[in-house]
Image (tube, grey):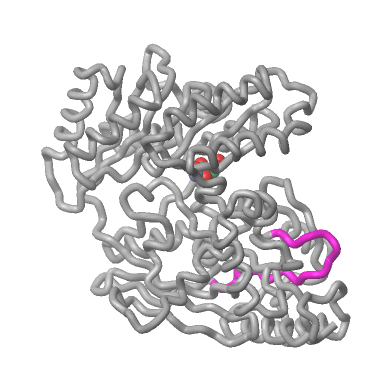
């Protein structure tokens, strides 16, 4: 009912008709078959319902939709490429919320080599943006496994991470400006490539990583960098995660901040990709317990760069830190090494049921966390396979479990809550985060309540109420909607 602090539980037919009229032909979908792909997340863990998929093609139309929904107190679920890991872009069951897809907002508004910036609309796919930057001889350093489908609005709204955070930071570090439709339909225009702007609160920061709960990101201006002229890539075999942490320190000492990627891969993940990914093969003759995919890049051409990288690895072998290493001698070899890391999620999916935990601890504490986690999981889920891989340079691991080889008849799924609780308690005991880069969505609302500092939670709830007083923006995501 208008006036109440909660969205309506039934979307009135007249409001749906008004939305359709405003969106025009091609601007909405309504049949069950057309809605279906928007109502389920890509991992098929979350399924909801919506009476209408709105497909606006401009900021003005997004503003029109939001303004009408604000008036009628209708909940709105923004969605980009639908690659969320936490159900953040999936409507809840009940059909109470309209789905606002940004897919038709595909314009690249400006690319400037002089400003080292790119301004694009929310529905642009990351791979297109990388290509647009490269066309003006610049680098957009966001690098995600899902870059062929993830879109800019979702990337900004989840503050996405990926495999170049070590050097370039999370999405937040790359955003210079934002355009946001606020929950009352006004447009907050802070699109600019300014590097310095200390005029009051930096409001754009509120919307980065807010998962659409404070407004709809419709466009963003991103920082660009010089394109690398020299690239050195290695796949490295070693005995322990502690050796990997130490190796990162010595590569930093030898190569400075040119180290862009430092990804941990356990033996079991290499076995998974070998079994399920066409063309993936173990680059070594002997197995190693752990591997690292490391890459360093330099903007200025330097024939000696790869040799310096190889010398740093040779020194690490000499010290007994590294057991073996191969470096890429061509673009094709580089791609083959990257595939061994990037295809782990799809290979793990083919190994049967799995549980995912997106955790981070300070890098120096990762080795002890991994050991304690392994012991814990052996006790809780004997036979299940620990697949701990990911962004070691950022202290962020996907601390995943796969069901025992041959299956366990759904036992792992039945234990999911208990295992998640135990892993997250261990993360908390190590001073870490229970969501390093995938967000909260609807999956981890309870986990956020359990582990977040109460003062921080209180501030989050106050910010939500101040900006979205009727609770229409992505209700029930990040924060419970009764709050
Ligand atoms: C990755 O690092 O591969 C992604 O974050 C996906 C995943 O967690 O599996
Ligand atoms: Zn990741």
Residue nearest the observer in this picture, 99 or 175 = 175
Q: Which x, y percent locates residue 317?
A: 23, 20
- Would you identify the image quadrant in which residue 55 lies? bottom right
Residue at the far top: name it.
286
Residue nearest the observer in this picture, 145 or 408 = 408
In reply to whether residue 102 is colored magenta, the answer given is yes
- Would you identify the image quadrant in which residue 265 lies? top left
Residue at (19, 18) in percent of width and height: 318
Q: How many callouts does the rendering have?
A: 0
Q: Is residue 416 above or below residue 383?
A: below
Q: Which x, y percent locates residue 225?
A: 28, 61
Q: Which x, y percent locates residue 241?
A: 40, 27
Q: Is residue 248 above or below residue 154?
A: above
Residue at (32, 60) in percent of width and height: 134
Q: Which x, y percent locates residue 445?
A: 67, 55
Left or right? Give the position of 247 relative to 307.
right
- Would you identify the image quadrant in which residue 50 lies? bottom right
Left or right? Give the position of 67 relative to 374.
right
Residue nearest the observer in this picture, 143 or 365 = 365
Specify start and end residues of the magenta stretch as a single range. Answer: 90-105
Q: Is residue 404 visible?
A: no
Residue at (69, 77) in percent of width and height: 27
**Quadrant (top left, top right, bottom left, bottom right) of the N terminus:** bottom right
Q: Is residue 381 above or below residue 160?
A: above
**Quadrant (top left, top right, bottom left, bottom right) of the C terminus:** bottom right
In reply to whether residue 426 is colored magenta, the answer given is no
Magenta stretch secondary structure, dominant: loop
């Amino acid at each position: 009912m208008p006036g109440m602090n909660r969205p309506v539980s039934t979307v009135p037919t007249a409001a749906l008709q008004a939305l359709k009229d405003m969106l025009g032909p091609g601007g909405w979908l309504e049949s069950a078959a057309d809605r279906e792909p928007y109502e389920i997340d890509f991992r098929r863990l979350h399924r909801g319902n919506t009476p209408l998929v709105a497909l606006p093609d401009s900021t003005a139309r997004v503003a029109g939709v939001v303004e009408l929904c604000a008036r009628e107190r209708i909940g709105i679920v923004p969605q980009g490429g639908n690659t969320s890991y936490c159900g953040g872009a999936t409507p809840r069951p009940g059909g109470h919320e309209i789905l606002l897809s940004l897919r038709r907002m595909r314009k690249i508004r400006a690319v400037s080599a002089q400003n080292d910036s790119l301004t694009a609309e929310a529905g642009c796919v990351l791979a297109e943006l990388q290509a647009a930057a490269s066309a003006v001889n610049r680098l957009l350093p966001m690098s995600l496994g899902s870059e062929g489908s993830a879109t800019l609005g979702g990337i900004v709204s989840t503050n996405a991470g990926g495999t170049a955070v070590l050097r370039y930071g999370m999405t937040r570090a790359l955003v210079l400006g934002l355009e946001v439709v606020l929950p009352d339909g006004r447009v907050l225009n802070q699109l600019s490539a300014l590097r310095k702007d200390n005029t009051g609160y930096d409001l754009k920061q509120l919307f980065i990583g807010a998962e659409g709960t404070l407004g709809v990101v419709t466009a963003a201006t991103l920082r660009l960098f010089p394109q690398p002229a020299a690239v050195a890539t290695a796949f490295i075999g070693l005995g322990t995660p502690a050796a990997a942490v130490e190796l990162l320190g010595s590569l930093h000492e030898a190569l400075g901040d040119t180290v862009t990627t430092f990804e941990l891969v356990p033996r079991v993940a290499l076995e998974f990709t070998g079994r399920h990914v066409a063309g993936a093969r173990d680059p070594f003759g002997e197995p190693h317990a752990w591997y690292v995919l490391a890459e360093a890049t330099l903007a200025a051409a330097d024939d000696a760069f790869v040799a310096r990288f190889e010398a740093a690895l040779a020194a690490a072998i000499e010290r007994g830190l590294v057991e073996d290493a191969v470096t890429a001698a061509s673009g094709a070899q580089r791609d083959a090494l990257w595939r061994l890391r990037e295809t782990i999620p799809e290979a793990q999916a083919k190994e049967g049921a799995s549980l995912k935990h997106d955790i981070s601890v300070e890098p120096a504490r990762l080795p002890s966390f991994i050991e304690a986690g392994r012991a814990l999981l052996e006790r809780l889920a004997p036979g299940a396979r620990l697949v701990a891989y990911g962004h070691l340079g950022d202290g962020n691991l996907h601390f995943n479990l796969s069901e025992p080889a041959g299956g366990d008849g759904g036992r792992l799924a039945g234990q999911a809550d208990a295992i998640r609780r135990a892993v997250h308690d261990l993360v908390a005991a190590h001073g870490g985060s229970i969501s390093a880069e995938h967000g909260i969505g609807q999956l981890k609302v309870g986990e956020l309540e359990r582990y977040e500092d109460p003062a921080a939670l209180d501030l989050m709830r106050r910010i939500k109420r101040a900006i979205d007083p009727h609770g229409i923006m992505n209700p029930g995501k990040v924060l419970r909607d009764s709050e």
